[in-house]
């Protein structure tokens, strides 16, 4: 759902172009200044929820039908009623505002309610209106579902955030009208490094649960991280549930399609071979995958090789990554099989890994994306297993560590331009405990996180460059 806010200003003076907000002002024949602002797509789309419910309903219907053949309806009913009481209590607590709740609680609640809903519908069909108990149950579940949705639309962080954003834009427009000669606040244009490094990180924005569901806790996702690449296509790559192999990658043609789970294209990396065997040689290993210039780069399954999968031609190239350790020798603290992590930033493609020679400490290599040849390598003194995950911004490696189940911190950096490392503390919230992948996209200054099955983004805020340099 996109919001278009068009505000026509009554007064207009000549230099509206200095307006820094991403808006273009123009004068028409009557000397009226028109400004159009396109707000980012951060509202919670109701359609997506509805579609999700529908898809989930279909899915759980099938599963539940199988399950119910084994279980007796009576037992299921008793269990359902217990769960329902539990859910009712939790919703009531939330409604009273007794405890602070997070978006995630909503997501979990909704998942549970949807499960209940499909169960109830199925029960209802099998009793064919003959059981008053089932009818009541059905109504109660629907009531809860409505309550949760209402709560959500009232209190969702994102709704508040968008409102705040609109208010701030309005204010800036008014300011622009009043003091047109005031210089606008400088921000950092995408693709440039005109800033003094990361200042802080936004709240997490949960985009959705990965399309395979809750059980798929490992993986990666994002857009093409090459500067100026097509930013419509979104990719999602859940790994097998053991967190090891990436056998296929799903692509959506747009953000809206991702949200609605619509128009997916799956690229399968495995190949069937003789005697019902499967060839995993082009599969990936771990969640270190990244998309760059229409190719997926990742650690090939069960080797120290780098794979490059061309999404246009489906061709796979590979290159042995000499000395890099693999197969869980030095992965990350909270996720396995990610010994070799790919990253991209304003400067291009990077590999973050480790070697025996460097005693398991992080090594950063700049990669030529065409030839997959290492252009330059830097060794750090940060132990790779002491890090949750890491990413590159403007040639600087940033590494995070866990503070607790809900907080994470960027605590370490290595600047490849100067060859210096440093400690820092930039804490940020997380939805779920474990981070399975974290990548930066220079096209939108966002971090893309795969967080226990949820697809999450963060906005990075940068420190200004010191005034003397500007
Ligand atoms: C402003 O918006 C346009 C169109 O969405 C986009 O191409 C451009 O990169 C944006 N510029 C900035 C500074 O955000
Ligand atoms: C759910 O099932 C119905 C009927 O079987 C079908 O028309 C509908 O398209 C399905 N919806 C989804 C999202 O799969
Ligand atoms: C009810 O919720 C509590 C936590 O709030 C949980 O420990 C308990 O197992 C739940 N009972 C049922 C029947 O789901
Ligand atoms: C359900 O009940 C209706 C009438 O109330 C009847 O026509 C229909 O055949 C019944 N369906 C099943 C599956 O028993
Ligand atoms: C469901 O909600 C309706 C109105 O919102 C109410 O009249 C009804 O009593 C509720 N039913 C149950 C079982 O809670
Ligand atoms: C992107 O790929 C195209 C060919 O597909 C190539 O011509 C171009 O040089 C690549 N760009 C970068 C920055 O690697
Ligand atoms: C990357 O490799 C290609 C092919 O070997 C070469 O043509 C290109 O100049 C290299 N790019 C850089 C920046 O070295
Ligand atoms: C984050 O940094 C921006 C400036 O880049 C500042 O406006 C904002 O208040 C900061 N937020 C927090 C929570 O420190």
Image: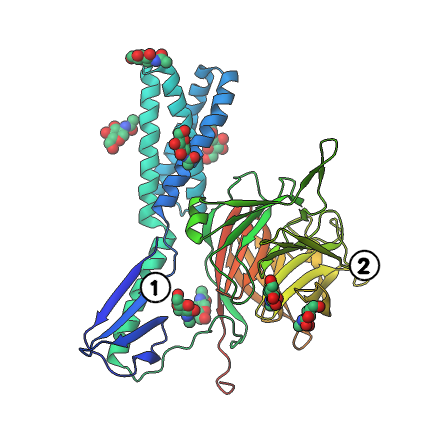
Instruction: Please provide percent x and percent y for residue 324.
Output: 77, 58
Q: Is residue 96 visible?
A: no
Residue shown at 58%/71% (left/top)? 394
Q: Quadrant of ligand 1?
A: bottom left
- Give me the residue at 35% from left, 44% from top: 47
| Residue at point 74%, 34% (across, down) | 274
| Residue 359 in the image: above or below residue 139 | below
**Mark 2 highlights which residue?**
356
Q: Which residue is mark 1?
A: 38
Q: Position of residue 417 (x, y in %)?
A: 65, 76
Give coordinates of residue 342: x percent, y percent. Answer: 64, 59
Does mark 1's beta carbon lie closer than 8 Å to ligand 1? yes
Tell me the SS state at disc 1: strand
Point out the residue furthest to the front here.
313
Return the x and y of residue 175 as percentages of the image width and height.
27, 76
- Front position in the image: 416 or 345: 345
Mark 1 surroundings: few (<14), some (14-19) or many (≥20) residues within 10 A: few
**Most foreground residue, 409 or 300:** 300
Looking at the image, which residue is at 36% across and 79% down?
A: 184
């Amino acid at each position: 759902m996109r919001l278009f806010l068009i505000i026509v200003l009554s007064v207009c003076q000549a230099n509206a172009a200095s307006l820094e907000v991403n808006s273009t002002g123009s004068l028409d024949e009557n000397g009226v200044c028109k400004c159009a602002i396109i707000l980012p797509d951060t509202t919670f789309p109701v359609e997506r929820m509805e579609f999700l419910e529908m898809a989930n309903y279909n899915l759980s219907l099938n599963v539940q039908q199988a399950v119910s053949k084994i279980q007796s309806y009576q037992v299921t009913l008793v269990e359902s009623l217990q769960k329902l009481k539990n859910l009712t209590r939790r919703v009531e607590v939330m409604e009273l505002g007794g405890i602070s709740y997070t978006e995630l609680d909503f997501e979990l609640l909704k998942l549970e309610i949807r499960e209940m809903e499909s169960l109830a519908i199925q029960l209802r069909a099998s009793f064919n209106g003959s059981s008053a108990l089932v009818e009541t149950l059905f109504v109660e579940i629907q009531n809860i579902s409505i309550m949760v949705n209402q709560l959500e639309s009232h209190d969702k962080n994102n709704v508040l955030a968008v409102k705040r954003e609109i208010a701030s834009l309005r204010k800036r427009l008014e300011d622009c009208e009043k003091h047109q000669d005031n210089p606008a606040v400088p921000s950092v244009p995408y693709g440039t490094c005109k800033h003094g490094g990361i200042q802080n990180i936004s709240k997490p924005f949960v985009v959705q649960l990965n399309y395979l569901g809750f059980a798929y806790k490992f993986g990666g996702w994002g857009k093409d991280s090459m500067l100026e690449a097509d930013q419509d296509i979104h990719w999602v790559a859940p790994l097998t549930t053991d967190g090891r192999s990436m056998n296929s990658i799903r692509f959506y043609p747009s953000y809206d399609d991702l949200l609605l789970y619509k128009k997916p294209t799956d690229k399968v990396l495995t190949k069937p071979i003789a005697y019902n065997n499967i060839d995993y040689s082009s599969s990936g290993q771990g969640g270190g995958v990244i998309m760059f210039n229409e190719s997926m780069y990742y650690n090939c399954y069960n080797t120290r090789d780098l794979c490059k999968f061309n999404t246009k031609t489906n061709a796979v190239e590979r290159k042995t990554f000499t000395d890099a350790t693999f197969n869980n020798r030095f992965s990350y603290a909270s996720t396995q099989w990610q010994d070799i992590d790919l990253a991209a930033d304003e400067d291009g493609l990077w590999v973050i890994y480790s070697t025996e020679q460097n005693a398991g400490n992080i090594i950063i290599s700049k990669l030529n994306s065409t030839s997959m040849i290492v252009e330059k390598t830097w060794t750090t003194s940060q132990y790779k297993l002491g890090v949750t995950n890491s990413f590159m911004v403007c040639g600087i490696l940033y590494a995070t560590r866990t503070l607790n189940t809900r907080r994470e911190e960027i605590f370490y950096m290595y600047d490849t331009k100067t060859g210096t490392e440093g400690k820092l503390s930039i804490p940020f919230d997380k939805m779920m405990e474990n981070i399975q992948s974290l990548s930066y996209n220079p096209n939108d200054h966002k971090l893309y996180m795969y967080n226990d099955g949820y697809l999450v983004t963060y906005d990075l805020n940068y420190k200004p460059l010191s005034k003397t340099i500007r």
